[in-house]
Image: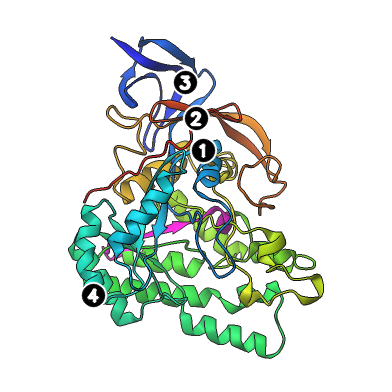
Amino acid sequence: MKYDLVIENGTLVTATDTFQASIGIRDGQIAAIGQDLSADQVVDAAGLLVLPGFIDPHVHLDMPTPAGNSSDDWFTGTRAAAFGGTTTVIDFVEAEREETLLHALDARRNLAASQAVIDFTFHMTLDRTNDNTLAEIPAVIAAGLTSFKCYTTYAMRLDDAQLLSALKVVGNAGGLTIVHSENDAIVNRLRADFLAVGKTEPRYHPLSRPAESEGEAVERVLALAQVAGAPVLIVHVSTRLGVEAIQRAQSRGQAAYGETCPQYLLLTDEAYSAPGFEGAKFICSPPLRKADDQNALWKVLADGSFRVLGTDHCPFFYHGTKNLGRPLDDLPPFTQIPGGIPGIEARPSLLYTYGVRTGRLSLNRWVDFCSTGPAQTYKLYPRKGALVTGADADIVLFDPHKPVKLSTAFLHENVDYTPYEGFELSGWPVKVFSRGQLIIDHGEYVGAAPRGQFIPRKI
């Protein structure tokens, strides 16, 4: 039997196995895995790792903020993701106050489809819990979104009663609630205290959002989810306190999950004390933490308590946006600096270099965090995140020895800096296939644009 394409001689790596085999692709799907497969087009993957396309479950493309939209739109952001081997992203839908959830979903989906070069889906943000909004949740799930984002801080935060209602309704409908967990009272009080005494530099940002603000909020969210009898996932966990709270919940049998990001594994709060205004480049929430928190996060990845690694990619230009366009003698206080950092492209290779090559993680754990874990958590599996027959042929050919030095000149994100400037990596994708189509070939984008598809999910 002939296939459209055969990838042969590579080492296949999944979340559970590592083995030698060929992959036969037909009509955009994996049609066979075995030996002696034939096709008119054959790709020799000798010396390369053959991986399921990576999934970034936490991105903010073209996201509106008071300072302007995040700088990567759906074309530049998804193309940058593809260069790093990511073939599916999960972004967010945020409905306006007088807008229905389904209307907001249609608008966001149409925008993404007009630009995206890889596949995509969304989390639905819940910033209110009135009867009409909660009544829409089953229809949102039927439309293909199975996860709902809530906040315990910012203007869109829910109070405890509202969050309990959201958890209960989403859980009863079979969905998953994901929560940005920081204590709003702690954050607002400390921010105000610092401003009152003129402490406005970027180095005060992490001090205004201490580890305790995350630890308390995670504990509270877990308690509310337990009462609601609903599963919950805490996004961008940054502290040992957050890790330990989730592990305790898991040990008592609660359906509690965690996500972390490369910035919390590889950067520390020392970055905020960079000379001048350079610390503004690293302002994100939760903020970067300390080495002890990093160690706790690496351990939880190694033992499998967490299975999701996102980027929280939310880029803003350092010149013109992070500084709000102000001159050096009138720079904004840390409270006004747009929060978010870039990272959509290098995530898999960062984790390979600093996780697999250092012995912190196995190859299979690496694939799980970057692909299979997000796919299973967010109901994309087995269409995504798997090297199995019937799955979409989202496949990465990864050279484990390819040297790369990260810089804005090398990366493709639409932003004027990278928080990983100068990081030297060993391992980078050389070919990336999305639904059987070659879209990245040795550092060149060769796919069509747009070509990304919305991927509906089912309970």
Magenta range is 250-265
Between tags 3 and 2, which lies in front? 2
Between tags 3 and 1, which lies in front? 1
Which residue carries the number 4 mark?
A: 227
In the image, residue 127 lies at what x, y percent? 36, 72
Which residue carries the number 2 mark?
A: 447
The numbered mark, 2 or 1, whose residue comes first in the sequence reads: 1
Crowd class of label 4 (few under 14; some 14 to 19; many from 20; radius 10 Å): few
**Spatial CA span between label 3 and label 1:** 20 Å
Question: Which residue is rendered at x = 64% and y = 62% of the image?
Answer: 282
Query: Is residue 382 magenta-colored?
Result: no
Furthest toward the right, the residue is 329
Picture quadrant of residue 255: bottom left
Between tags 2 and 1, which lies in front? 2
Q: Amino acid at mark 2?
A: Gly
Q: Is residue 19 left or right of residue 211?
A: left
Residue 10 circle label:
3
The numbered mark, 3 or 1, whose residue comes first in the sequence reads: 3
Q: Is residue 6 left or right of residue 198?
A: left
Please say if 336 is above or below 363: below
Label 3 residue SS: strand
In front here: 443 or 295?
443
Which residue carries the number 1 mark?
A: 82
